Image (cartoon, helix red, strand yellow):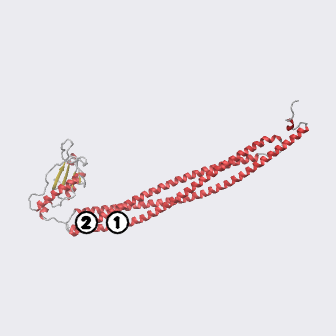
Amino acid sequence: MARFGQLWHLRTFSHTEKDGVRRPPHTAVVVFHSYAAVSDVINASCNPKAGSFWKTDFVQAHALTRKGIVYEKYLTEIIPEINQASHVTSSGSNDPARSSGNSSEPLDPERYEPLLKRPRTENSGTAGGSKGIKNRPSTLKPSETQTATIEWLRAQIARLETELKSALTARNQYASERDAIRVAYEAEQRAHRETMSQKQVAEVALSQEKAEQARICSEFGAEPLHGSTGGQEKPTRSCSGECVKSCERIKDLQRELKDTRERHLQEQRKMESDATAKLNEAKATIQQLNSDSKRLESDLQSTQDKLKSTQESMESMGKECASAKLGTTELIDAKAATLRLQSDAEQSKFELASVREQLDSTRRLLESKEREYASVLKEHDGAKGKLETCKNRLENEQILVLKLRDMLISEAYKSLGASHESLGVIMRAMGIPPAAELGNIGPK
């Protein structure tokens, strides 16, 4: 490490196995006097040359992660040692501030994931090293005004982060509402398909009923009304039985048609009410989404303006600190946080545009669904008219069947009476007594 630059501090770490055996050091925290040395170490680790110790010893260097035991040791032990060494150097000590020695401390292997790392600290010193510290014995600190400005910037950054989180939450809520609208639309489409299938079944039943009525009418129309021959008694009785069966069949068909019509009307009313409620709910949701989208746009614009003003303040603060040679860690963190917030705001703006496009597509789908719903209502009205027409025709045909039945029964009785009278005349002409007299004659 010494060939990359002057070392300010070096601390190695190791961990102890379960059997009490301490492993060799596998992690080190190295603090340089200059940023250039840190950059050289990182570049050399990222682009190792053949035969270098990066490859032979499998060593990797990276920035110090702000979590874990190593970072806690850095905050609680390394920084106090560096500050103490700096004070000793500034008080006139001839020994340069150098490493406090290599020490190995036990490290829990379960909480520390990377095994071979040489992280660097983010709070390294300036390029002047200990010599620069001697020339400047008093430690430079920000003034009270600059401290207040930094605190204000931190508060602004925290508030902007909160607003950005609320905007992301609103975007997630919009996405969930869009998914709910899509699910409702799919359910309504399924209900529409079921209604159309039921309508087709009703139309098939009506066509079958029409065919049955046509067959009955053709049978009654082809059956002749015979007069006064005695041999027509059996066909007349069979025709009367057929009339009774046809009447019963017509009554059954009428009941089935009535039940089907009532069920169809109930399903139609239910579907209309559900579709109307869903459409109203979807319209209200779209209006709410539009208003929320406008509000989110205004919030995003205000956030961008605030970020811009904060960035300008940070730039001016950076210029002041550069003029005063104050490279404080707080200012660097504030700049990084501002840049991160700016990138998050751009990402949120892009996601808001995509959400707006999805809302437009959802609105177009709802409009097409309204048109389909209107066409379905028209089809239902047409089917209702057809059902009324079929009902009237069925009633007329039922009246016709009843008239035919009464007429056939009266004609059959008349035919039987005429046949009986003609048979009595023939028997009297032949000298045969009537059937009543034959019953009184006994054997001699």
Whole-percent x, y for residue 115 in the image: 23, 47
According to the picture, the residue beneath numbered tag 1 turns out to be 303
- Relative placement, left or right, of 414 versus 205 is right
Asked if one can make out residue 52 in the rendered structure from this viewpoint, the answer is no
Say which element carries label 1: helix
For the residues labelled 1 and 2, the Cα–Cα distance comes to: 19 Å
Q: Could you say which quadrant of the image residue 346 lies in? A: bottom left
Between 213 and 364, the residue placed more toward the observer is 213
Q: Residue at coordinates 20% horizontally, 41% vertically from top-left? A: 19
- Classify mark 2: residues with Cα within 10 Å, few (<14), some (14-19) or many (20+): some
- Whether residues under marks 1 and 2 lie with C-beta atoms below 8 angstroms apart, the answer is no
Image x and y of residue 410, in percent: 79, 47
Q: Amino acid at mark 1?
A: Thr
Dot 2 amino acid type? Glu
Query: Which residue is found at the position 47% from the left and 57% from the top?
Result: 181
Q: Is residue 178 visible?
A: yes
Label 1 Cα crowd, 10 Å radius (few <14 / some 14-19 / many 20+) = many
Against 331, residue 59 (above or below) is above
Residue 313 lies left or right of residue 4; in this view the side is right
Residue of label 2 = 151
Q: Is residue 240 above or below residue 280?
A: above
Residue at (73% x, 48% y) in the render: 217
Residue 379 lies left or right of residue 229; in this view the side is left
